[in-house]
Image: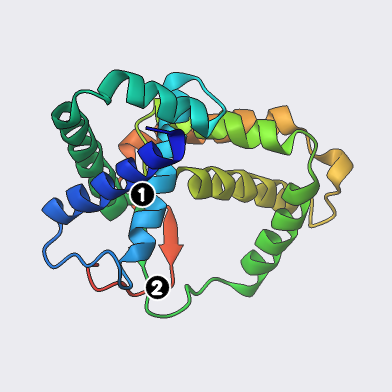
């Protein structure tokens, strides 16, 4: 089986196993977005656990380990899907209206996002935050949470410097150290970290 075929097989299994946890799950309706999120998180989680950067590598390794053991593969996907769904319900809040924030906070976040897009070592900063999140048990919406934490930290720097912060003033290592500390405390926090303006039937 080639890599793409095995990837599609994993995706199909993920759809089926999410359905075992969620009554009236309809993956090819509005619920499909949830499957996309889960599939992306599974790839990211596997990359961290396998210490691999290439999606092809992780699917090749999965096929080597489970290609002749479909039952074990299904059980593994089922177990992961259960953990992911638990984290989804803990970390993701579905909103029917836009999340309201104070105007000054919105402005800081907007500026922080712009600075983040151009910060030195952006990909490395994000990669380290993602790895730290996985190491501390976060398996749902991993990349969005990593980016949000980084942007929030940049926004704090903006607030401290009365909005006059420039790209030159940002130290990626300092940003990561602060984000890393926050991630270390996440196991004690049970509230949402991601807010989505979607209304899937299952939530």
Residue sitting farthest toward the front: 1
Q: How many marks?
A: 2
Please indicate whether residue 49 sits to the left or right of residue 105 in the image.
left
Q: Nearer the viewer, residue 170 or 56?
A: 56
**Residue 184 showing in the rendered view:** no
Please indicate whether residue 168 sits to the left or right of residue 156 in the image.
right
Please indicate whether residue 166 sits to the left or right of residue 35 in the image.
right
Q: Quadrant of the C terminus?
A: bottom left
Residue pointed to by mark 1: 38
Q: Which of 149 and 131 is in front in this view?
A: 131
Residue for point 48% across, 77% down? 98
Q: Is residue 189 above or below residue 28?
A: above
Q: Where is residue 13 in the image (x, y as percent from the top left)?
A: 24, 45
- At mark 2, the secondary structure is loop
Q: Where is residue 155 in the image (x, y as percent from the top left)?
A: 67, 52
Q: Nearer the viewer, residue 41 or 29?
A: 29
Mark 2 against mark 1, which lies toward the viewer?
1
Label 2 crowd (10 A; few <14 / some 14-19 / many >=20): some
Q: In this view, does 124 lie above or below 50?
A: below
Q: Which of 47 and 91 is in front in this view?
A: 47
Q: Where is residue 33 in the image (x, y as percent from the top left)?
A: 38, 63
Residue pointed to by mark 2: 198
Residue for point 26% across, 54% down? 89
Residue for point 37% across, 79% down? 96
- At mark 1, the secondary structure is helix
Label 1 crowd (10 A; few <14 / some 14-19 / many >=20): many
**Residue 143 showing in the rendered view:** yes
First in residue order: circle 2 vs circle 1: 1
Q: In which quarter of the image is the N terminus?
A: top left
Q: Position of residue 46 (x, y in %)?
A: 41, 29
CB under 8 Å between callouts 2 and 1? no
Q: Residue 6, located in which quarter of the rendered image?
A: top left
């Amino acid at each position: 089986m080639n890599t793409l075929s095995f990837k599609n097989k994993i995706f199909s299994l993920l759809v089926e196993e999410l359905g075992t946890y969620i009554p009236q799950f309809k993956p090819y309706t509005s619920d499909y977005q949830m499957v996309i999120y889960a599939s992306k998180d599974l790839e990211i989680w596997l990359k961290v656990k396998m210490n691999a950067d290439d999606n092809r590598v992780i699917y090749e390794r999965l096929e080597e380990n489970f290609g002749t053991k479909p039952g074990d593969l299904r059980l593994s996907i089922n177990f992961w899907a259960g953990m992911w769904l638990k984290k989804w319900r803990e970390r993701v809040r579905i909103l029917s209206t836009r999340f309201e924030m104070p105007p000054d906070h919105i402005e800081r976040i907007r500026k922080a996002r712009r600075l983040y897009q151009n910060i030195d070592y952006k990909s490395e900063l994000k990669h380290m935050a993602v790895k730290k999140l996985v190491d501390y048990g976060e398996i749902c919406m991993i990349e969005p949470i990593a980016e949000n934490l980084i942007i929030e930290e940049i926004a704090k720097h903006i607030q401290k410097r009365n909005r006059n912060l420039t790209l030159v003033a940002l130290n990626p290592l300092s940003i990561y150290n602060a984000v890393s500390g926050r991630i270390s405390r996440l196991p004690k926090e049970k509230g949402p970290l991601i807010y989505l303006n979607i209304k899937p039937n299952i939530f």
